[in-house]
């Protein structure tokens, strides 16, 4: 993959794999920036699968783990915020 593709518009993921000694925490920060910069015309899951196809072979890299976690969390959404409606007694 190259820098500045539709799946990585700013080249953030591309650059993350080039940083020696990058931590998982730093990868999460980069991932968040990547997710916010992804165009509205791009489906996040599809983009993540494409990035993992290119970079996922380096399973020891923390960004590979973060991308995999991102793909998993998209597939299993959680309920967020608010009170649950409960039947009254």
Image (cartoon, helix red, strand yellow):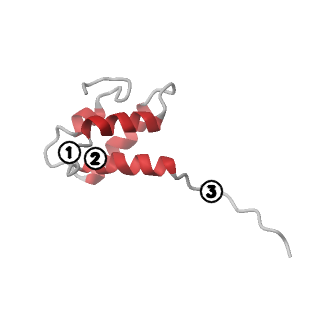
Quadrant of image for the N terminus:
top left
**Residue visible at 43% across and 30% down?**
38
Q: Which mark is residue 12?
A: none
**Residue visible at 32% across and 27% down?**
10
Mark 3 or mark 2, which is nearer the start of the sequence? 2
Q: Residue 58 carries which label?
A: 1
Is mark 1 in CB contact (under 8 Å) with mark 2?
A: yes
- When asked about the image quadrant of residue 37, the answer is top left
Mark 3 or mark 1, which is nearer the start of the sequence? 1
Let me know if residue 34 appears in the view.
Answer: no
Residue located beneath label 2 in the image: 64
Q: Nearer the viewer, residue 50 or 14?
A: 50
Quadrant of image for the C terminus:
bottom right
Q: Which of 33 and 51 is in front in this view?
A: 51
SS class, disc 3: loop
Mark 2 or mark 1, which is nearer the start of the sequence? 1
Residue located beneath label 3 in the image: 81
Outermost residue toward the right?
A: 89
Could you say where residue 81 lies in the image, as x and y percent from the top left? 62, 56
Left or right: 82, with 67 as reference point = right
The 10 Å Cα crowd at callout 3, few under 14, some 14 to 19, many 20 or more, is few
Q: How far apart are marks 2 and 3 (CA)?
A: 29 Å
**Residue visible at 15% across and 49% down?**
21
Could you say where residue 62 lies in the image, as x and y percent from the top left? 25, 50
Camera-nearest label, 1 or 3:
1
The 10 Å Cα crowd at callout 2, few under 14, some 14 to 19, many 20 or more, is many
Q: Distance between the residues labelled 1 and 3?
A: 36 Å
């Amino acid at each position: 993959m190259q820098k500045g593709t539709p799946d990585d518009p700013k080249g953030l993921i591309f650059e993350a794999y080039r940083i020696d000694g990058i931590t998982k925490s730093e990868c999460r920060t980069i991932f968040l920036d990547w997710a916010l910069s992804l165009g509205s015309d791009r489906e996040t899951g599809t983009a993540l699968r494409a990035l993992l196809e290119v970079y996922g072979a380096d399973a020891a890299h923390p960004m590979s783990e973060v991308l995999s976690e991102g793909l998993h969390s998209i597939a299993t959404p959680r309920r967020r915020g608010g009170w649950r409606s409960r039947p009254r007694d």
